[in-house]
Amino acid sequence: MSQKPLRGLRIVDLTHVWAGPLGTRMLGDLGADIVKVEAPLARGPALSPPGGVGVFAGGEPGTEPWNRQSVTIKLNRSKRGICIDLKSTHGKDTLLELVRVADVVIENFSAQAMNNLGLGFEVLSDVNPQIIYVAMPGFGSYGPYSGLAAFGPSVEPMTGVGALLGYSKDQPRNSAMALVDAVAGVSAAAAVVTAVNRCRETGRGAKVELSLHEAGVSLFGEFLVDYQLGAQHTPIGNAHPRYAPHGIYPTLGEDQWIAIACPDQACWIALRDEARLWTDVEQFDEPSHRLAHRPALDKKLSEWTREQNKHELQQRLQAAGIPAGAVNTAPDVLEDAHLKERGYWVDQALNGQPTVRYPGLAIKLNQKERSVGRPAPKFGEHNREVLQEWLGSTTADVDELIAQGVLLDRPPG
Amino acid sequence: MTTRVLEIGGLAAGFCGRLYRHAGADVVRVDHAVPDAWVSERALDVFLHEGKRRVGSADATLIRQLAEHADVLIAEGTPQSLAALGWYELSSPAIRVAITPFGLTGPYKDWQATGSVLLAMGGYSYLMGDPDQAPLNLPGHYVQYQSGQHAYVAACALQYEGEGNQTADVSMWEVVLSLSQFTTVMWTSNGQIRQRHGSDFGLLYPISMFPCADGWFHVNVVPAFWSAFTHMLGMPELEVDSRFAQSSDRVLNRDLLEQIIRERLGRKTRAEIMRLGEEARVPTGILLELHEVLADEHLAVRDFWQDVGGVRCPKLAYRIIDR
């Protein structure tokens, strides 16, 4: 039995892609009993499942490629999985039965999808008045944009971060990594724990509305506040608006870099002494002078950094008390000694598959070794287990649903 | 019963306290070290600290006394600075969450970091920006605020459990790593190091940002939207054009497709492009300046802003509507 804090919390997880599964993974890692409900084609048709990005764990599709998509595995550990055809009457009924005994339902479909399936909040809360229903449409369930198709990357420039990120005002950039999905995912976990604690006090269920758009605006909202107070913010590359140096500097090797920042005078003095590059030290010792002559400062610093190995320089600058970090790639972080010692990574191997290392949970409880939950479910792996455990279904009941095509353990096609 | 939260530290603890404040908690903040902020102190006060009470001293005795009357303690700093505050001797409150740059343990535990350093070390920076320029960092306090959210989730989970005397260790570096998208799996699965591609997503095309008559727009054309996008371009024939028909073709012929997109949409306004995207059901966004976000009709209709002393401040990412 899990001794994690959210043990006993039952969550029906209808999420897909990134933001939703990320949020429920956090909750699952913290012990919630997550049942991931997938549509028959959620992982693509059996004969030609989408390879996607990251592609297959171990690099090979194997005989069940839909069970080896590495992004799916990464995002869905600590969950059990069932596959229900929600377009069928029996499928809807089965879902409603699960909702009746659950604490939370969470989905990140488009705004009207659940209503169109006949599974909107009113229907679910009639079945279970204490249910917490979390909806995560791109722009929310109402408002002028609510009908727009939305993915994290297309929402991102509308949040304000687009006015801030880039090399200059003429060279804005998208993060190219679906930033608002990551914000919304963690926000969803925060919303769930808030709502369930509140429900314990009030005894009432609730609808939680979380839009990707508002998640992004909220996280970067301090710039909107600052703008109203008279500040001007535009993309300024890797500079910091209030101090220098602050940037990403080249190091030895092709496309190798290090981030260095001197947020206070002590850091500057340490860097200056470490680098020994300045003959006109007194001038640069003045913070406002450094800020005013940032390009010259960065140029000088780059001349020094580009002759050095990024990891060695990171060590050296940190030893001198200077915030500095190598611009890491995946192999860099996977080999890092600190992360290994802290037991950060999660090694997973689904049945018969090679062991692959995935990012862990960034929360360590009670200084114990970290443990996350079970590996990501194979498609429909827990159809029988969940229905029997949550609903008390008999073997014959489940067999009937399988025979009707309501429950699947292999994608069609 | 109102939760009493003692918040010590900089930006991450401040964001955690903000979430607690919006949830109705009584939050007392102890300012501990000057934050490495991108915005003015007044902006931080409005954004992070509205409704909190502030204590000006981080004296360890005072911290212990305040902690005895709290339900939750959120403390941010380095392990060394937290030790100076008496962190390791505290036995109350029952729930204590530490937010540190690299965690409470491990070889780097006493290292210094800013948000930019953590983004670099966490693999974000390498992926952002142009291949022929330096990697880019995110502006602002993404790392700190996502760490604050993690601390909040941890504390609320421990409150849910209700068993008392629990601690959580939130490493800001690990927060960044846990929010990577394909960074590690591309390496562990394919042996590929993900590269940066400007505003391109890089793995599929077109998922990118383009200039237009009055600014910039973004389209997110995953394979399922290719057909719709050809209609948005007014060139349905491209759907079966052998240069673009398959997803891999579009990546291969990226430059040609970019040229077509610029020709067909580059002279239109952002409003026209949004309308085309809506009609075609293609995920489309436009780059909004800060004043445009503040004036956005959608956010106004959704009652997204709260007034804090005459300043519009965003509410939270989520809203909870009781049944």
Image: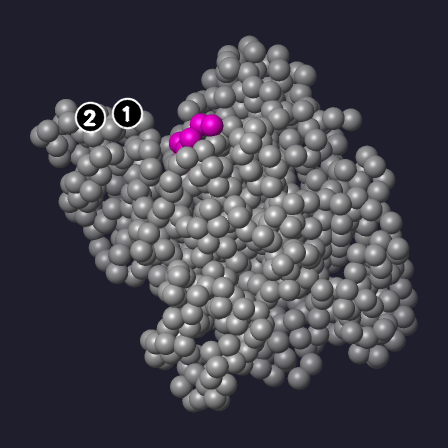
Task: Please name the residue that numbered disc 1 is placed on.
Answer: A265
Colouring used for the render: one colour
- Residue in the image at 80% along x and 63% along y: A119
A121 sits to left or right of A303 = right
Q: Are marks 2 and 1 in contact (CB under 8 Å)?
A: yes
* Residue A208 in view of the camera: yes
Left or right of B67 on screen, residue B311: left
Which amino acid, mark 1?
Answer: Gln
**Relative to A231, is A94 above or below?**
below
Mark 2 and mark 1: Cα distance apart in space: 8 Å
Disc 2 target residue: A285
Side of B91 where B215 appears, left or right: left
Q: Position of residue A392 (x, y in %)?
A: 89, 60
Task: Judge whether residue A62 can be spotted in this image.
Answer: no
Q: What's the magenta region?
A: B36-42
**Image height of B234 relative to B195, above or below:** below
**Chain for disc number 1:** A
Neighbourhood count class around disc 2 (C-alpha, 10 Å): few under 14, some 14–19, many 20 upward: some
Q: Chain of mark 2?
A: A
From this view, report whether residue A172 is shown above or below residue B20: below
